Image (cartoon, helix red, strand yellow):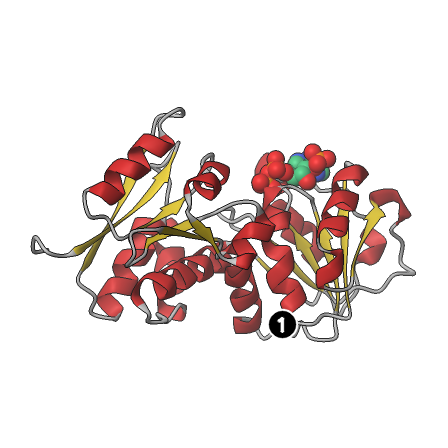
Amino acid sequence: MSQDADKYVVFGNPIAQSKSPFIHTLFARQTAQKMTYEAQLVPLDGFEAAASQFFAAGGRGCNITVPFKEQAFTFATQLTERARLAGAVNTLKKLDDGGILGDNTDGEGLVQDLLRNQVELKGKHILLVGAGGAARGVILPLLAQKPASLTVTNRTLSKAEALAALFASHGKVSAIALDALSADQHFDLIINSTSASLSQSLPGIPASLIHPDLVCYDMVYGQEETTFNQWAAELGALKVIDGLGMLVGQAAESFLLWRGIRPGTEQVLRELRRALQ
Ligand code: ATR
Protein backbone atom coordinates (compact mmCIF):
# COMPACT_ATOMS: atom_id res chain seq x y z
CA MET A 1 0.00 0.00 0.00
CA SER A 2 1.28 3.49 -0.75
CA GLN A 3 2.77 5.88 1.85
CA ASP A 4 -0.30 8.05 2.23
CA ALA A 5 -2.72 5.30 3.25
CA ASP A 6 -4.58 6.15 6.48
CA LYS A 7 -3.28 4.19 9.45
CA TYR A 8 -5.37 2.15 11.87
CA VAL A 9 -4.32 -0.36 14.52
CA VAL A 10 -5.68 -2.59 17.23
CA PHE A 11 -3.94 -2.37 20.62
CA GLY A 12 -4.02 -5.29 23.03
CA ASN A 13 -2.04 -7.70 25.16
CA PRO A 14 -2.03 -10.43 24.02
CA ILE A 15 -2.78 -9.47 20.41
CA ALA A 16 -1.52 -12.26 18.15
CA GLN A 17 -4.96 -13.95 18.21
CA SER A 18 -6.80 -10.79 17.10
CA LYS A 19 -9.04 -11.21 14.06
CA SER A 20 -9.42 -7.45 13.63
CA PRO A 21 -6.66 -7.01 11.00
CA PHE A 22 -8.24 -9.79 8.92
CA ILE A 23 -11.71 -8.24 9.21
CA HIS A 24 -10.72 -4.62 8.55
CA THR A 25 -8.46 -5.55 5.65
CA LEU A 26 -11.45 -7.24 4.01
CA PHE A 27 -13.70 -4.26 4.79
CA ALA A 28 -11.13 -1.89 3.26
CA ARG A 29 -10.86 -4.02 0.13
CA GLN A 30 -14.62 -4.31 -0.20
CA THR A 31 -15.15 -0.53 0.09
CA ALA A 32 -11.97 0.49 -1.77
CA GLN A 33 -10.55 2.46 1.14
CA LYS A 34 -6.91 3.46 1.14
CA MET A 35 -5.94 2.39 4.62
CA THR A 36 -3.75 0.01 6.60
CA TYR A 37 -4.79 -1.87 9.72
CA GLU A 38 -2.29 -3.68 11.93
CA ALA A 39 -2.16 -5.38 15.30
CA GLN A 40 0.12 -3.83 17.91
CA LEU A 41 1.20 -5.54 21.12
CA VAL A 42 1.34 -3.02 23.95
CA PRO A 43 3.18 -3.60 27.25
CA LEU A 44 0.75 -3.85 30.16
CA ASP A 45 1.87 -0.47 31.52
CA GLY A 46 2.26 1.17 28.13
CA PHE A 47 -1.17 1.91 26.67
CA GLU A 48 -1.16 5.68 27.04
CA ALA A 49 2.35 6.00 25.59
CA ALA A 50 1.50 3.75 22.64
CA ALA A 51 -1.77 5.53 21.86
CA SER A 52 -0.20 9.00 22.19
CA GLN A 53 2.65 8.01 19.89
CA PHE A 54 0.26 6.48 17.35
CA PHE A 55 -1.91 9.59 17.07
CA ALA A 56 1.09 11.95 17.12
CA ALA A 57 2.47 10.03 14.13
CA GLY A 58 -0.73 10.67 12.17
CA GLY A 59 -2.75 7.56 13.07
CA ARG A 60 -6.44 8.04 12.29
CA GLY A 61 -8.09 5.55 14.60
CA CYS A 62 -7.67 2.39 16.61
CA ASN A 63 -9.45 -0.48 18.23
CA ILE A 64 -8.68 -1.42 21.79
CA THR A 65 -9.01 -4.89 23.21
CA VAL A 66 -8.24 -6.64 26.49
CA PRO A 67 -6.94 -5.31 28.89
CA PHE A 68 -6.93 -1.67 27.77
CA LYS A 69 -10.60 -0.75 27.23
CA GLU A 70 -10.90 1.15 30.51
CA GLN A 71 -7.61 2.98 29.88
CA ALA A 72 -8.85 3.95 26.41
CA PHE A 73 -11.97 5.33 28.11
CA THR A 74 -9.74 7.64 30.15
CA PHE A 75 -7.53 8.49 27.17
CA ALA A 76 -10.44 9.79 25.04
CA THR A 77 -11.11 13.53 25.16
CA GLN A 78 -14.77 13.01 24.15
CA LEU A 79 -17.09 10.03 24.60
CA THR A 80 -20.20 8.80 22.87
CA GLU A 81 -23.09 8.12 25.25
CA ARG A 82 -22.87 4.38 24.67
CA ALA A 83 -19.16 4.44 25.59
CA ARG A 84 -19.83 6.55 28.67
CA LEU A 85 -22.43 4.07 29.91
CA ALA A 86 -20.34 1.06 28.93
CA GLY A 87 -17.48 2.49 31.02
CA ALA A 88 -15.12 1.20 28.35
CA VAL A 89 -13.91 2.18 24.88
CA ASN A 90 -13.11 -0.22 22.04
CA THR A 91 -12.73 2.44 19.31
CA LEU A 92 -10.81 5.71 19.21
CA LYS A 93 -10.97 8.22 16.38
CA LYS A 94 -8.84 11.31 15.79
CA LEU A 95 -11.12 14.32 15.35
CA ASP A 96 -10.45 17.25 13.03
CA ASP A 97 -9.97 19.57 16.02
CA GLY A 98 -7.22 17.29 17.36
CA GLY A 99 -9.39 15.68 20.04
CA ILE A 100 -9.83 11.94 20.39
CA LEU A 101 -13.34 10.48 20.33
CA GLY A 102 -13.94 7.30 22.33
CA ASP A 103 -16.76 4.97 21.30
CA ASN A 104 -17.90 1.49 22.22
CA THR A 105 -19.27 -0.49 19.27
CA ASP A 106 -19.59 -3.88 21.00
CA GLY A 107 -23.26 -3.55 21.87
CA GLU A 108 -24.29 -2.31 18.44
CA GLY A 109 -22.24 -5.14 16.95
CA LEU A 110 -24.31 -7.60 18.97
CA VAL A 111 -27.61 -5.94 18.01
CA GLN A 112 -26.68 -5.90 14.31
CA ASP A 113 -25.70 -9.57 14.45
CA LEU A 114 -29.00 -10.51 16.14
CA LEU A 115 -30.97 -8.56 13.51
CA ARG A 116 -28.89 -10.17 10.74
CA ASN A 117 -29.95 -13.52 12.18
CA GLN A 118 -33.60 -12.40 12.00
CA VAL A 119 -33.87 -12.30 15.78
CA GLU A 120 -36.49 -9.73 16.71
CA LEU A 121 -35.76 -7.65 19.81
CA LYS A 122 -38.64 -5.18 19.95
CA GLY A 123 -41.26 -6.30 22.48
CA LYS A 124 -39.26 -9.38 23.44
CA HIS A 125 -38.16 -10.64 26.86
CA ILE A 126 -34.37 -10.86 27.07
CA LEU A 127 -32.26 -12.55 29.74
CA LEU A 128 -28.65 -11.34 29.90
CA VAL A 129 -26.40 -13.76 31.77
CA GLY A 130 -23.28 -12.22 33.31
CA ALA A 131 -22.58 -8.78 34.70
CA GLY A 132 -18.97 -8.02 33.77
CA GLY A 133 -17.63 -5.60 31.20
CA ALA A 134 -19.07 -7.59 28.30
CA ALA A 135 -22.59 -7.32 29.74
CA ARG A 136 -22.25 -3.63 30.58
CA GLY A 137 -21.15 -2.87 27.02
CA VAL A 138 -24.29 -4.24 25.39
CA ILE A 139 -27.12 -3.06 27.65
CA LEU A 140 -27.74 0.41 26.18
CA PRO A 141 -27.89 -0.77 22.53
CA LEU A 142 -30.18 -3.66 23.55
CA LEU A 143 -32.51 -1.28 25.41
CA ALA A 144 -32.55 1.01 22.35
CA GLN A 145 -34.30 -1.84 20.48
CA LYS A 146 -37.24 -1.50 22.91
CA PRO A 147 -37.45 -5.01 24.31
CA ALA A 148 -40.43 -5.72 26.63
CA SER A 149 -37.88 -6.45 29.37
CA LEU A 150 -34.18 -6.94 29.93
CA THR A 151 -33.32 -9.08 32.94
CA VAL A 152 -29.73 -9.42 34.13
CA THR A 153 -28.63 -12.47 36.10
CA ASN A 154 -25.19 -13.32 37.44
CA ARG A 155 -23.35 -15.76 39.69
CA THR A 156 -22.58 -12.73 41.87
CA LEU A 157 -26.01 -11.14 42.21
CA SER A 158 -24.76 -7.78 43.54
CA LYS A 159 -23.02 -7.11 40.20
CA ALA A 160 -26.25 -7.74 38.28
CA GLU A 161 -28.10 -5.42 40.65
CA ALA A 162 -25.49 -2.70 40.17
CA LEU A 163 -25.83 -2.95 36.38
CA ALA A 164 -29.63 -2.83 36.52
CA ALA A 165 -29.43 0.28 38.71
CA LEU A 166 -26.93 1.92 36.35
CA PHE A 167 -29.28 1.55 33.36
CA ALA A 168 -32.61 1.96 35.20
CA SER A 169 -33.35 5.34 33.61
CA HIS A 170 -32.73 3.97 30.09
CA GLY A 171 -35.36 1.21 29.90
CA LYS A 172 -37.02 -1.77 31.51
CA VAL A 173 -34.06 -3.47 33.12
CA SER A 174 -34.00 -5.52 36.31
CA ALA A 175 -31.77 -8.04 38.11
CA ILE A 176 -32.56 -11.56 39.27
CA ALA A 177 -30.59 -14.20 41.17
CA LEU A 178 -29.63 -17.33 39.23
CA ASP A 179 -31.49 -19.50 41.76
CA ALA A 180 -34.65 -17.40 41.42
CA LEU A 181 -34.93 -18.29 37.72
CA SER A 182 -37.57 -20.88 36.84
CA ALA A 183 -39.72 -22.10 33.98
CA ASP A 184 -42.40 -19.63 35.14
CA GLN A 185 -40.37 -16.87 33.49
CA HIS A 186 -40.61 -16.82 29.74
CA PHE A 187 -37.64 -15.42 27.84
CA ASP A 188 -37.51 -15.11 24.05
CA LEU A 189 -33.76 -14.60 23.96
CA ILE A 190 -30.96 -15.58 26.35
CA ILE A 191 -27.60 -13.87 25.84
CA ASN A 192 -24.60 -15.42 27.59
CA SER A 193 -22.04 -12.67 28.21
CA THR A 194 -20.02 -14.73 30.69
CA SER A 195 -16.72 -16.32 29.80
CA ALA A 196 -17.94 -19.71 31.12
CA SER A 197 -17.80 -21.41 27.69
CA LEU A 198 -14.09 -20.60 27.46
CA SER A 199 -13.50 -23.02 30.35
CA GLN A 200 -16.07 -25.52 29.02
CA SER A 201 -18.42 -24.64 31.86
CA LEU A 202 -22.02 -23.48 31.96
CA PRO A 203 -23.07 -20.12 33.42
CA GLY A 204 -25.58 -21.67 35.86
CA ILE A 205 -29.04 -20.91 34.48
CA PRO A 206 -31.64 -23.69 34.92
CA ALA A 207 -32.39 -26.06 32.04
CA SER A 208 -36.10 -25.33 32.53
CA LEU A 209 -35.61 -21.92 30.83
CA ILE A 210 -34.88 -23.62 27.49
CA HIS A 211 -37.96 -24.02 25.29
CA PRO A 212 -38.58 -24.69 21.58
CA ASP A 213 -39.07 -20.99 20.66
CA LEU A 214 -35.99 -19.73 22.48
CA VAL A 215 -32.98 -18.15 20.78
CA CYS A 216 -29.64 -18.41 22.61
CA TYR A 217 -26.64 -16.21 21.89
CA ASP A 218 -23.18 -16.89 23.32
CA MET A 219 -20.68 -14.04 22.99
CA VAL A 220 -17.91 -16.65 22.98
CA TYR A 221 -16.72 -17.98 19.62
CA GLY A 222 -13.97 -20.22 18.36
CA GLN A 223 -15.41 -23.57 19.40
CA GLU A 224 -17.26 -25.57 16.78
CA GLU A 225 -20.25 -25.11 19.06
CA THR A 226 -19.76 -23.21 22.31
CA THR A 227 -20.37 -25.10 25.55
CA PHE A 228 -23.43 -22.99 26.34
CA ASN A 229 -24.89 -23.25 22.85
CA GLN A 230 -24.36 -27.00 22.71
CA TRP A 231 -26.19 -27.34 26.04
CA ALA A 232 -29.09 -25.15 24.88
CA ALA A 233 -29.36 -26.90 21.51
CA GLU A 234 -29.47 -30.33 23.15
CA LEU A 235 -32.27 -29.06 25.40
CA GLY A 236 -34.26 -28.06 22.32
CA ALA A 237 -33.67 -24.33 21.82
CA LEU A 238 -34.93 -23.04 18.46
CA LYS A 239 -31.66 -21.45 17.44
CA VAL A 240 -28.17 -20.93 18.89
CA ILE A 241 -25.72 -18.28 17.66
CA ASP A 242 -22.08 -17.77 18.63
CA GLY A 243 -20.24 -14.46 19.04
CA LEU A 244 -18.26 -14.43 15.81
CA GLY A 245 -20.89 -12.28 14.10
CA MET A 246 -20.75 -9.83 17.02
CA LEU A 247 -16.99 -9.56 16.49
CA VAL A 248 -17.51 -8.72 12.82
CA GLY A 249 -20.45 -6.46 13.74
CA GLN A 250 -18.47 -4.35 16.22
CA ALA A 251 -15.69 -4.03 13.64
CA ALA A 252 -18.21 -2.83 11.05
CA GLU A 253 -19.46 -0.14 13.48
CA SER A 254 -15.87 1.02 14.11
CA PHE A 255 -15.21 1.11 10.37
CA LEU A 256 -18.39 3.19 9.90
CA LEU A 257 -17.25 5.65 12.58
CA TRP A 258 -13.82 6.04 10.95
CA ARG A 259 -14.67 5.97 7.26
CA GLY A 260 -18.35 7.00 7.07
CA ILE A 261 -19.15 3.83 5.12
CA ARG A 262 -21.01 0.80 6.47
CA PRO A 263 -19.26 -2.33 5.16
CA GLY A 264 -21.14 -5.54 4.41
CA THR A 265 -20.60 -8.20 7.07
CA GLU A 266 -21.99 -11.42 5.53
CA GLN A 267 -19.10 -12.32 3.28
CA VAL A 268 -16.45 -11.24 5.78
CA LEU A 269 -18.09 -13.42 8.43
CA ARG A 270 -18.14 -16.37 6.03
CA GLU A 271 -14.45 -15.89 5.19
CA LEU A 272 -13.52 -15.51 8.85
CA ARG A 273 -15.38 -18.69 9.79
CA ARG A 274 -13.61 -20.53 6.98
CA ALA A 275 -10.22 -19.16 8.11
CA LEU A 276 -10.87 -20.33 11.68
CA GLN A 277 -11.69 -23.92 10.69
P1 ATR B 1 -15.96 -9.57 30.77
O1 ATR B 1 -15.35 -8.22 30.59
O2 ATR B 1 -15.63 -10.56 29.68
O3 ATR B 1 -17.42 -9.51 31.04
P2 ATR B 1 -15.45 -9.96 33.59
O4 ATR B 1 -15.70 -8.53 33.88
O5 ATR B 1 -14.36 -10.68 34.29
O6 ATR B 1 -15.19 -10.20 32.04
O7 ATR B 1 -16.83 -10.74 33.86
C1 ATR B 1 -16.97 -12.09 33.65
C2 ATR B 1 -18.44 -12.48 33.84
O8 ATR B 1 -18.57 -13.88 33.60
C3 ATR B 1 -18.95 -12.25 35.25
O9 ATR B 1 -20.33 -11.99 35.18
C4 ATR B 1 -18.67 -13.59 35.91
O10 ATR B 1 -19.46 -13.85 37.03
P3 ATR B 1 -19.05 -13.25 38.49
O11 ATR B 1 -19.42 -11.80 38.44
O12 ATR B 1 -19.86 -14.01 39.45
O13 ATR B 1 -17.57 -13.49 38.62
C5 ATR B 1 -19.05 -14.51 34.78
N1 ATR B 1 -18.44 -15.86 34.83
C6 ATR B 1 -17.19 -16.20 34.46
N2 ATR B 1 -17.01 -17.53 34.57
C7 ATR B 1 -18.18 -18.04 35.00
C8 ATR B 1 -18.64 -19.35 35.29
N3 ATR B 1 -17.84 -20.41 35.16
N4 ATR B 1 -19.92 -19.50 35.69
C9 ATR B 1 -20.73 -18.43 35.83
N5 ATR B 1 -20.36 -17.16 35.57
C10 ATR B 1 -19.10 -16.97 35.16
Which x, y percent locates residue 48? Answer: 36, 33
At mark 1, the secondary structure is loop
* Residue 183 vs residue 83, the one in the foreground: 83
- Percent position of residue 247, x then y: 46, 55
- Tell me where residue 205 appears, x and y as whole percent: 79, 47
Query: Ligand 1 is located in which of the four quadrants?
Result: top right
Viewport quadrant of the N terminus? bottom left
Q: How many marks?
A: 1
Does residue 277 show up? no
Tell which of 169 and 20 is nearer to you. 169
Three-letter amino acid code at the position of disc 1: Val
Above-or-below relation of 140 to 133? below
Image coords of residue 39 (percent x, y)? 29, 42
Q: Residue at x 47, y 34 (%)?
A: 67
Q: Quadrant of residue 87?
A: top right
* Position of 277 relative to 185 (above/below): above
Q: Is residue 220 left or right of residue 259?
A: right
Quadrant of res 41: top left
Q: Residue at x 84, y 65 (%)?
A: 186
Which residue corresponds to mark 1?
Answer: 119
Give left or right: position of 94 versus 87.
Answer: left
- In the depicted structure, whether residue 101 falls above or below residue 27: above
* Above or below, comparing residue 13 to residue 272 in the picture: above
Q: Is residue 3 visible?
A: yes
Dot 1: few (<14), some (14–19), or many (≥20) neighbours within 10 Å?
Answer: some
The residue drawn where x is 59% and y is 46% is 134
Q: Residue at x 42, y 63 (%)?
A: 253
Mark 1 vs ligand 1: CB below 8 Å: no
